[in-house]
Image (cartoon, helix red, strand yellow):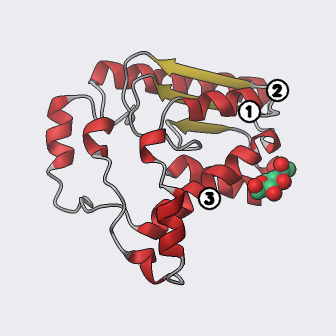
């Protein structure tokens, strides 16, 4: 959700303020199994927002699909402050709405960006990064797909994989600083 929130801030600000964007497995396209059913949202919608806080949308077992490294999964899954209930009606409706808005506005992206995704991401499918890469107007755009990696590219992969992703991000930043930074 951080990627979608960043993109919304980007759309609401002066694009010249931004020297670059890095997205780690952003959610811009809802994967089919996560998409809320239109009928369901319509029915809840008839309740004038009363249902928005109901945790009654189908669950997607996200943590296991996010974290690939079994040791890290154990630690993250046992965090007592982690939300383990079902998604709320209002959350899913807004996610669907915001994803649509972002997809309709991909062409407004002009800043240099790097978008990274694991090919085995079961939470936000790589289509999100691929569509941004295809449709953005930015001249300087980079898509990195990591074979077999899950959603959480930095906290959830083995140290070796996480360091590969971080290394690519660092390299992207360094080369942009050289290219566009003040001499
Ligand atoms: C941005 O998205 C909104 C909502 O889908 C749409 O009405 C608008 O035309 C889009 N703007 C651009 C520049 O494409």
Mark 2 residue crowding within 10 angstroms, few (<14) / some (14–19) / many (20+): few
> Can residue 180 be seen in this snapshot?
yes
Residue pictured at 47% horizontal, 22% vertical: 167
Mark 1 residue crowding within 10 angstroms, few (<14) / some (14–19) / many (20+): some
User: As rendered, which of 2 and 105 lies closer to the eye?
Assistant: 105
| Circle on res. 112 | 1
Q: Which residue is mark 2?
A: 139
Position in image of residue 81 (x %, y %): 22, 62
User: As rendered, which of 37 and 79 lies closer to the eye?
Assistant: 37
- Determine whether the residue tagged by mark 1 lies in a helix, strand or loop: loop
In front of the other: label 3 or label 2? 3
Residue 36's place in the image compared with 151, above or below, is: below
Instruction: Give the number of callouts.
Output: 3
Position in image of residue 45 (x %, y %): 53, 75
Residue 22's place in the image compared with 174, above or below, is: below
The yes-or-no answer for disc 1 within 8 Å of ligand 1 is: no
Position in image of residue 75 (x %, y %): 16, 44
The reply to whether dot 2 and dot 1 touch (C-beta < 8 Å) is yes
Q: Which residue is mark 3?
A: 97
Mark 3 residue crowding within 10 angstroms, few (<14) / some (14–19) / many (20+): few
Q: Quadrant of residue 62?
A: top left
- Determine whether the residue tagged by mark 3 lies in a helix, strand or loop: helix
The quarter of the rendered structure image containing the C terminus is top right
- Determine whether the residue tagged by mark 2 lies in a helix, strand or loop: loop
Residue 115's place in the image compared with 97, above or below, is: above
């Amino acid at each position: 959700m951080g990627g979608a929130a960043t993109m919304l801030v980007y759309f609401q600000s002066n694009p010249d303020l931004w020297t670059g964007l890095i997205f780690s497995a952003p959610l811009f396209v809802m994967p089919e199994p996560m998409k809320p059913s239109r009928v369901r949202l319509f029915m809840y919608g008839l309740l004038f927002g009363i249902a928005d806080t109901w945790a009654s949308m189908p669950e997607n077992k996200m943590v296991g699909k996010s974290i690939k490294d079994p040791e890290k999964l154990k630690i993250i899954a046992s965090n007592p402050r982690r939300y383990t209930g079902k998604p709320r009606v209002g959350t899913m409706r807004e996610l669907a709405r915001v994803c649509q808005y972002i997809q309709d506005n991909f062409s407004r992206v002009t800043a240099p960006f790097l978008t990274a995704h694991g090919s085995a991401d079961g939470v936000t499918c790589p289509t999100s990064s691929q569509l941004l890469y295809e449709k953005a107007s930015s001249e300087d755009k980079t898509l990195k797909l990591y074979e077999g990696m899950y959603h959480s590219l930095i906290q959830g992969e083995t140290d070796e994989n996480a360091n590969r992703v971080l290394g690519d991000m660092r390299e992207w930043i360094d080369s942009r600083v050289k290219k566009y930074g003040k001499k």
